[in-house]
Structures are given as C-alpha cells and as structure tokens.
Image: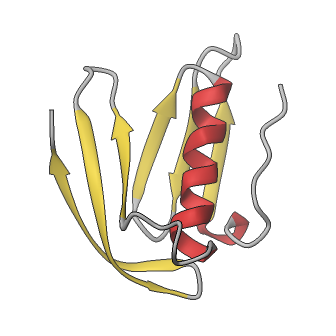
Amino acid sequence: MAIVIDTRIKKYIKGCLIGENEDVISIHLEDVGDTFHFDDELVVQNFLNTQAIERVGDKELRKGFFDYTDAEGEIHRYHIKNVYRGRITDYEEEIVA
C-alpha cells in the first residue's frame, strides 16, 4: 500500500492510521479538526489530491469545497472560506445527501 502525501500539506495531517487488515485508513486533518475514515486506498489518494489542490494548487483548479462520504453514506461538504498558506482557517460543513 502506497499513499502519496503532497509535502506542502503534510504538516496539516496529524495522523494517518492503517487498520489491522489494511481495511480502514484514518486521516486526521489538524486545521479542520476532524478525522476522516476510508476503506479504499484509491479513495484516500483522491481525497489527499483534492486537499492539495484546494489548499495550495492553482487557483483556477480550486472548487472552494471538498466532499467526504462517511460510513453511513452521508456526504459532508466542507465549504472553504479562507486558506492561508495551505492551512484552512475558516470553513463551513454541511450535509448534502
């Protein structure tokens, strides 16, 4: 299992745990103050790539939000209101589905 974390956002990730059978991967984002759980490494990589784009990527590629689907299938949308040097300083969370 190989998950690549962009070095520019690595400092905001304060925990990356892989389950006993590599079935659950947990990532804690310090600035958002939330832990995100995944059951597929491809989903984790896509999530981390989205984090890199929204935090430090080209402004033309940013959408201003990122989504997370929890274990119950609910989609949480994190609207990013302010980013300062890759750190999310202000956001709003809503459940969209």
Q: Position of residue 47 (x, y in %)?
A: 55, 44
Farthest residue to the front: give it.
60
| Left or right for 91, reference 35 | left
Q: Is residue 82 above or below residue 69?
A: below
Q: Quadrant of the C terminus?
A: top left
Image coordinates of residue 64 in percent, x first then y, are 36, 68
Task: Name the quadrant containing residue 79.
Answer: bottom left
Give the residue displayed 83% in from the left and 25% down from the top: 1
Residue at 58%, 22% (x, y): give it: 24
Numbered marks: total: 0
Q: Is the image coloured rainbow, by chain, by secondary structure, or in one colour?
A: secondary structure
Residue 78 picture location, percent across and down: 30, 57
Q: Nearer the viewer, residue 23 or 69?
A: 69
Q: Name the residue furthest right.
A: 2
Apparent side of residue 89 relative to residue 12 in the rendered image (left or right): left
Q: Residue at x 63, y 51 (%)?
A: 49
- Residue visible at 15% across and 41% down in the picture: 96
Residue 91, above or below 83: above
Task: Give the image location of residue 91, x and y in percent.
Answer: 28, 71
21 versus 93 height, above or below: above
Q: Is residue 51 above or below residue 70?
A: below
Q: Residue furthest top?
A: 21
